[in-house]
Amino acid sequence: MSLLEISDLHASVAGQPVLRGITLAVEAGEVHAIMGPNGSGKSTLAHVLAGRPGYEVTAGQVRFDGQPLLSLAPEERARAGLFLGFQYPVEIPGVNNAYLLRAALNAQRRQRGLPEIDAFDFLKLVKQRMQTMQIDESFLSRGVNEGFSGGEKKRNEILQMLVLEPKLALLDETDSGLDIDALKVVARGVNTLRSPERAIVLVTHYQRLLDHIVPDRVHVLARGRILRSGDRELALELERRGYDWILEQAAA
Amino acid sequence: MSANTQIDALVDRSYQHGFVTDIESDTLPPGLDEDVVRAISARKREPQFLLDFRLRALAHWRKQKEPHWAQLHYPPIDYNAISYYSAPVVRNDAPKSLDEVDPKLLATYAKLGVPLHERARLAGVAVDAVFDSVSVATTFKERLAKAGVIFCPFSEAVQNHPALVERYLGSVVPYTDNFYATLNSAVFTDGSFVYIPPGVRCPMELSTYFRINAAKTGQFERTLIVADAGSHVSYLEGCTAPMRDENQLHAAVVELVALDDAEIKYSTVQNWYPGDAEGRGGIYNFVTKRGECRGRNSRISWTQVETGSAITWKYPSCVLRGENSVGKFYSVALANNHQQADTGTKMIHIGANSRSTIVSKGISAGHGQNAYRGLVKILPSATGARNFTQCDSLLMGSECGAHTFPYIETRNPSATVEHEASTSRISEEQLFYCLQRGLDAEDAVNMIVSGFCREVFKELPMEFAVEAQNLLAVSLEGAVG
């Protein structure tokens, strides 16, 4: 049984069909990359899986960790171990990062029948993860993403992921807007999470992220469908040849 | 479910402090005339100057018309249907200690989470508890007395410190000030009196829990705080009221006087019954609060968290008379269901280099209507005066409203006046972001709202800040799901 099983998933946004029959299985321990041209439905897929309001599933099924996923509320999906790293993390003025992160961690721990983490242990945990992500300690008392640069926001997403330790991380264009040094830091953070019981799905435009986080499987998503799947060679080929040849083959 | 439906749902929550304590009351029949005023004054064995003050106020009030310029809508108030005096019947006069206080009353405080003897001592807070119109318990008198601080029920101050009362009463809010202040001046029953002698830093936070109880009894508190030269005091006021059907009028007056180099911090958490989800019942709160920075380098700050009342009409203000004096106003006002709040401040700059800061956070939910009304007035004498105003509104749901009425009058060209305003909604993105991290929607909204109010909460004494945050959560809870 796969950790994530998507069967013939169709979804619409504002009445417009965006996903037109996605079938995909992700095993525990794997890293998958979903690539594709702009507007192909990559981000929509990530948001549908996370349960974002306004994204309507019109057909198909998803099972996560053996359970039906689509009937769960977004917070239930999160507590079941599904994490979405946002492409554009939102600012929440006045709420400090440490507060949100601790509340999130405790909400998830309660769900799993674990006691709440005390302030001291939490601080120890988060500081250690911050080191991995090269984030300054002053960050803890700053407002959530408030006044963060694009790169800081992305690092914060990965930091949150490392603290919450999800079973499945969906990372939506986590590499966009990062310079090469920041990209390496982010990649190191993601690689830290790799383990036999977890899976990571990277949504990305560019091959360069995959130099640092080497995927087991690569999928090309276009026009709402997965048109081609392969191993990491596929990503390199896409970099050389672009997407048109796949679109043409699919149309033929 | 869309974010909006979730937020709308959040807004249902019934009042937790709804109950009426059954204590025998000595209540005057409804109506207002000279006899009533004389009766109140006689029952309180007041000196002549105070009776004269009341009678002048009554005569003036009769010539006044109820003001209707605020952004508030409510049925006419029948001032003759109100009883202007209600005192719990006390055995053997006033209780000498908590042991003598009616156990039911103590139970009331316990229900409100105000265990007078335990928590007050632990927290180092002196509590002058006003129950209806007569103060029934006062603690920590001795420690305060040692410092020379006078903190007592207003009626007691009238007996024991008549000269101070006569000197300062009505000196900030004259009896002619406005309709409600004039009414209060005629019929006020009790309240708190504070005097901090020169150079004294009050050794503890002074705290009063007000509570409206007897049915159909308007509440007319009078509070007077005088900080003499070089002194410092922090005063906390918290309110809850029992649930009932009729509207209750509340028209308090608070006067603050800060002399040279003195500082007064006045914090309020107000949680009166706001009415039911359709807007029935609930307290009408028409309050006049004003502080005068009378001396050089004096400072007054108002911090308020307003979550209750059906109608709130309240503009805690500062008259900055002293050179280099500083006035501050930090406010969170929540209007939920059918609550209406018209609140803000006035900063009147008279002294040279006087400075003022206004931070107003309005939250509107349900059908709530929230108005900020502020006046910054710089008089010709106020050379170098500065004001900074920040006015933010947060809307939750689509049926509520936020209104901002800033008035600025500058009559000195050297003055600097800044005004910033924003209106936002709790965005679907913010909510979804928190949900995606595993928070439930209720916690997420509370967190976002608390963040919005943070600049104000950090001005509150710590214990109060926690209470305020809880209160806000309670007032918005019930909804998401």
Image (spheres, grey):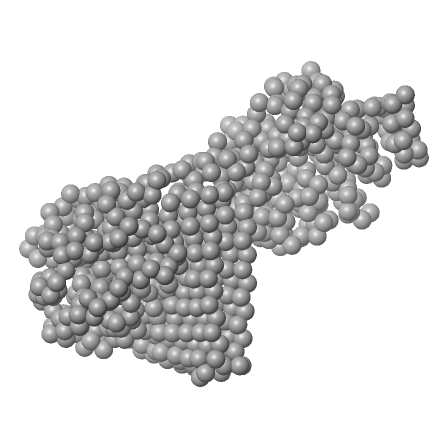
Q: Is residue B36 left or right of residue B432?
A: left
Q: Is residue B274 left or right of residue A162?
A: left
Could you say where residue A84 lies in the image, as x and y percent from the top left? 66, 35
Displayed quadrant of residue A17: top right
Number of numbered labels in the structure image: 0
Could you say where residue A232 lies in the image, as x and y percent from the top left? 86, 29
- Residue shown at 58% from the left, 40% from the top: B428
Q: Front-most of B76 and B448?
A: B76
- Residue shown at 35% from the left, 52% from the top: B73
Give the residue at the far top of this rendering. A1
Displayed quadrant of residue B147: bottom left
Could you say where residue A28 lies in the image, as x and y percent from the top left? 71, 23
Give the residue at the far right of this rendering. A240
Q: Eyeballing the image, is B412 above or below A139? A: below
- Residue shown at 57% from the left, 44% from the top: B427
- Residue shown at 22% from the left, 56% from the top: B219
Could you say where residue B439 lies in the image, as x and y percent from the top left? 53, 36
Q: Eyeballing the image, is B144 above or below A14? A: below
Picture quarter with the N terminus of chain B: top right
Displayed quadrant of residue A57: top right
Q: Is residue B423 left or right of residue B208?
A: right
Q: Front-most of B65 and B308?
A: B65
Q: Is residue B206 visible?
A: no
Q: Front-most of B202 and B260?
A: B260
Q: Is residue A84 visible?
A: yes
Q: Front-most of A39 and A235?
A: A39
